[in-house]
Amino acid sequence: MNHFLIGLILVIGCAGGLQAEEQWQASTLSAETIRKIQSETAKYHHCLGGEVKQFQQKRMDSRDAANLILKRCEAKLLPIRETFLAQNVEIAAVDRYLKRKRHQAARKVLQTMMFAESQRAP
């Protein structure tokens, strides 16, 4: 019984030590770099908004329209990638960030297009 309790305490103690290493660290990016990334992100969202307005008028499947919109605005994400890489951010972290941005945009664009399609239907 005592060996079990000692083993349990050791396991819990080791797990607590691992959590301490994985805690969030403050960003080392400069305020200027963050502003530049935010500016480029705003340009990406502006592109998406403009494309959505164009496609809302067309009679097209919402999924196909969303795919076309996302493809047309994909190039707006390249400056964000370049900014991160210029600041020596790990490629895996950059790819994860851009993937998250793409997924969020895809959900929002598809939601908007499906809403517009439902409004057209009698």
Image (spheres, rainbow, N blue to C red):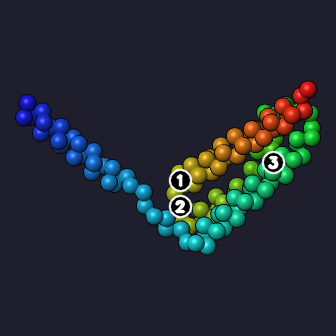
- Separation of disc 1 and disc 2 at Cα? 7 Å
Write down the residue under mark 3. Answer: 72
Residue annotated with mark 2: 89
Residue 37: image x %, image y %? 65, 63
Quick check: 23 above or below 12?
A: below
Which of disc 3 and disc 1 is earlier in sequence? 3
Question: In the image, which disc is placed on residue 93?
Answer: 1
Crowding at dot 1, Cα within 10 Å, few <14 / some 14-19 / many 20+, comes out as few
Q: Is residue 37 above or below residue 15?
A: below
**Residue 64 shows in this picture:** no
Q: Earlier in the sequence, mark 2 or mark 3?
A: 3
Q: Nearer the viewer, residue 97 or 19?
A: 19
For this view, does 37 lie left or right of residue 115?
Answer: left
Name the amino acid type tagged 2: Val
Q: Alpha carbon of mark 2 to alpha carbon of mark 3: how far?
A: 26 Å
Would residue 14 appear left or right of 101 to someone viewing this image? Answer: left
In this picture, is 55 found above or below 34? above
Q: Is residue 69 visible?
A: yes
**Identity of the amino acid at label 1?**
Ala
Q: Name the image quarter holding residue 64.
A: top right
Q: Determine whether the residue tagged by mark 3 lies in a helix, strand or loop.
A: helix
What element does badge 2 sit on?
Answer: loop
Q: Quadrant of residue 23?
A: bottom left
Check the picture and name the quadrant holding the C terminus. Answer: top right
Amino acid type of the residue that numbered disc 3 sits on in the rendered structure:
Arg
Q: Residues within 10 Å of mark 2 (few under 14, many from 20)?
A: some
Q: Position of residue 4 (x, y in %)?
A: 12, 33
Where is residue 43? Give x, y as percent: 76, 60
Residue under the point 49% across and 68% down: 28
Q: Is residue 101 left or right of residue 66?
A: left
Q: Quadrant of residue 32?
A: bottom right
Against 31, is 122 above or below?
above
